[in-house]
Image (cartoon, helix red, strand yellow):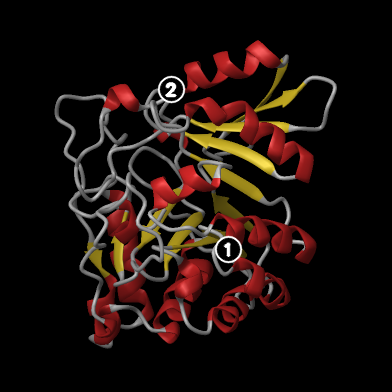
Amino acid sequence: MYTAPPPLVDRYGRVHTDLRVSLTDRCNLRCTYCMPAEGLNWLPKAEVLTDDEIVRLVRIAVTRLGIRSIRLTGGEPLLRRGLPGLVARLTDLGPEVSLTTNGIGLARMAADLKSAGLHRVNVSLDTLRPERYAEITRRDRIADVFAGLAAAQAAGLAPVKINAVPVRGVNEDEILDLVEFAAEHGYLMRFIESMPLDAQGAWERDKMITADELLAVLTERWELIPVGRHGNAPAEEWRIAGTDTVVGVIASVTRPFCGGCDRVRLTADGQLRNCLFATQESDLRALLRGEADDPAIEQAWRNTIARKGPGHDINSADFVQPDRPMSAIGG
């Protein structure tokens, strides 16, 4: 008889079932809010987990720790060689597997990823204007993103979600345009509050468009009907009255949802993080390469989650920004 593994629970009773796996710290964009124009010092190849190592850790997570969903992130995960093959190996383990991408290269890979078992994609897109996209990302690739969105939709990687980070003085004038674009094409629009995770340490709170400001803009145009939050999902959602269009808001800063957090993160070099804003990591790669057995890796994982704090403290004077930027942590 099958016996479910004991839950992966922290000292506050939060059960962790969602694993974010970064496949690479590399990216083919140079977004101004993420990294400098010259990029960052990428991890040496030898320090990045191999496919076999990722599969083993995910197998342990699924069979021994109760993880039910996997989100593949980066950097830009589409830069990982042989990605469809890795996705197929992960989906064979049983969890729902999704992916967050900047969309470049998605048109070429969407069908193969769907065939490999990928469930859905989130695509980052902060503007619909080609010139503004080039300013934000330092690359002229918005046509590739539009093509990637359409290909993902055609391949059945639904719901296709668009993630946008509105920033004051940059793109806040496109909030309504982005919602209308998503509605027209059948995508799900989500806005994310800007967070202090840039490599430059230049995040400014007063440039963040808050959830309240977003909702004020939206309600000037439409009547919003609360949908709420699905389980421990980070997004609060609203439906535009009289339509099937749903808009989500992830208010990590002004409406933190740490009390229901069920996520744990694995970096591309095999470091386990119990919070996006964690300042400490656990080295699972060293255990893997030191020939540790599955129970030892399971226990290290449980110990890491047991140390998880109550929240991220962004709004506290004691907040310390992580040493790693978002591109190196994985979203």
Query: 319 left or right of 193?
Result: left
Observer-nearest of 19 and 192: 192
N-term-proximal mark, 2 vs 1 = 1
Q: 35 above or below 242?
A: below
Residue 109 image position (x, y, % from top left):
63, 74
Q: Residue at x 28, y 83 (%)?
A: 45
Observer-nearest of 258 and 6: 258
Q: 59 above or below 122?
A: below
Observer-nearest of 190 and 177: 177
Query: 318 left or right of 315?
Result: left
Q: Residue at x 52, y 38 (%)?
A: 234
Q: Does residue 211 appear anywhere in the picture?
A: yes
| Residue on which the image places disc 2 | 210
Observer-nearest of 233 and 155: 155
Q: Does residue 9 appear anywhere in the picture?
A: no
Disc 2/disc 1 C-alpha distance (Å)? 41 Å
Q: Residue at x 25, y 71 (%)?
A: 42
What kind of element bears circle 1?
Answer: loop
Q: Amino acid at mark 2?
A: Thr
